[in-house]
């Protein structure tokens, strides 16, 4: 184990493989993560996945509400390097200037494309053919620092947010492990981002989860897989929200969009701009996720035929 003193900053499950790699190869002095949150219907106060890993491995944890106002806990440690991965707050200059090897971020896109908090979701929603990981130096902007190394991933037709999240998470940990020795030796590459090529992937808003059936079938499929399994796309039927996790598309000429025009034994077919979207896996309001065929077994199918969805 190298005697490099690391402060790691991260919050969700995506960050855990990076923390695990650092813990196994370096000296992680402190883990900084977001405060515990109330989760679920019972509103149980729950630690982040990063905090859970840290506690299980006896690593000290710090949970500032606003990092800008609580810097000294980190600065007094005088870490050699700060590594961040999906932490959730922008670091102030005083903290960025603290470690001798700098502050390094693991970001789930090929920068400068998809800066921000939802790069995996937006890459899928926008129908990108590839994405990847960028290891970068942090500055005072949002994912605007100099790039060190990238690795490209070709998005597969069956990828959704869940599968792509797991693949990029592992890729990020492996790429960081590969590049860290050169960062510590100060022999790494360093490339400025081209601002004219920058795009942004801000956190998903509630209205972005709603399906607009005036879109093409391809656009709707991308939206569904770009929100599966969280936060999940939805439409309204009989004034009740139904979440969609999987769907297939069939191209054909359509007169009116948003109409249930076909019901098979295992799917509900809803018209869209250029065909019919066959919904095959859903979560009705207040119920568990189920194949659409199970949902159809419990209702009067005749009531669905020609019903307008919103």
Image (cartoon, rainbow, N blue to C red):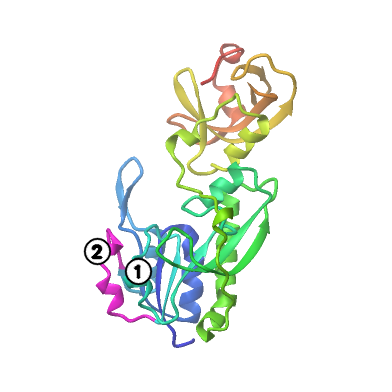
From the image, tell me which residue sits under label 1.
Answer: 93
**Percent position of residue 54, x then y:** 38, 69
Q: Pick the residue in front: 83 or 27.
A: 83
Earlier along the polypeptide chain: callout 1 or callout 2? Answer: 2
Q: Pick the residue in front: 184 or 140.
A: 140
Q: Name the residue located 70 percent from the left edge and 17 percent from the top edge.
A: 254
Asked which secondary structure carries label 1, the reply is helix
Above or below: residue 298 compared with residue 182: above
Residue 133 image-quadrant placement: bottom right
Say how many tags the image has.
2
Above or below: residue 54 compared with residue 280: below
Above or below: residue 231 compared with residue 178: above
Extreme residue toward the right, this view: 252
Q: Name the residue located 60 percent from the left edge and 65 percent from the top edge.
A: 171
Q: Name the residue located 45 percent from the left edge and 67 percent from the top edge.
A: 138
The residues tagged by marks 1 and 2 sit, at their Cα atoms, a distance apart of 12 Å
- The residue segment tinted magenta is 62-79
**Percent position of residue 249, x then y:** 70, 30
Could one spot residue 266 in this view of the protein? Answer: no
From the image, tell me which residue sits under label 2.
Answer: 69
Residue 40 image-quadrant placement: top left
Q: Name the residue located 57 percent from the left edge and 64 percent from the top edge.
A: 134
Circle 1 residues within 10 Å: few <14, some 14–19, many ≥20: few
**Percent position of residue 88, x then y:** 39, 57
Circle 2 residues within 10 Å: few <14, some 14–19, many ≥20: few
Residue 139 image-quadrant placement: bottom left
Q: Is residue 286 left or right of residue 197?
A: left
Is residue 75 shown in magenta? yes
Residue 129 is tagged as none
Is residue 89 shown in magenta? no
Asked which secondary structure carries label 2, the reply is helix
Q: Is residue 199 left or right of residue 250?
A: left
């Amino acid at each position: 184990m190298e005697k490099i003193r690391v402060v790691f900053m991260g919050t969700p499950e995506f960050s855990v493989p990076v923390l695990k790699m650092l813990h196994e190869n370096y000296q992680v002095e402190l883990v900084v993560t977001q405060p515990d949150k109330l989760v679920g219907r019972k509103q149980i106060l729950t630690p982040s996945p990063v905090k859970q890993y840290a506690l299980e491995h006896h690593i000290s944890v710090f949970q500032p509400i606003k990092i800008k106002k609580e810097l000294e806990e980190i600065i007094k440690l005088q870490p050699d390097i700060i590594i961040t991965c999906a932490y959730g707050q922008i670091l102030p200059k005083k903290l960025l200037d603290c470690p001798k090897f700098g502050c390094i971020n693991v970001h789930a896109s090929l920068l400068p494309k998809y800066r921000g908090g939802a790069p995996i979701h937006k890459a899928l929603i926008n129908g990108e053919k590839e994405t990847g990981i960028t290891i970068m130096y942090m500055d005072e902007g949002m994912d605007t620092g100099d790039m060190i190394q990238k690795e490209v991933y070709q998005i597969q037709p069956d990828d959704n947010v869940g599968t792509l999240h797991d693949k990029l998470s592992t890729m990020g940990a492996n790429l960081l492990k590969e590049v860290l020795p050169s960062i510590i030796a100060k022999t790494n590459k360093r490339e400025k981002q081209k601002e004219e090529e920058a795009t942004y992937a801000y956190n998903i808003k509630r209205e972005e989860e709603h399906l607009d059936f005036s879109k093409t079938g391809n656009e709707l499929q991308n939206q569904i897989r770009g929100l599966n399994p969280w936060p999940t796309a939805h439409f309204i039927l009989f004034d009740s929200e139904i979440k969609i996790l999987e769907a297939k598309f069939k191209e054909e000429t359509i007169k009116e969009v948003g109409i249930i025009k076909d019901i098979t034994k295992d799917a509900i077919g809803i018209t869209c701009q250029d065909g019919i979207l066959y919904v095959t896996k859903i979560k009705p309001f207040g119920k568990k996720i189920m194949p659409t065929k199970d949902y159809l077994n419990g209702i009067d199918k005749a009531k669905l035929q020609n019903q307008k969805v919103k």
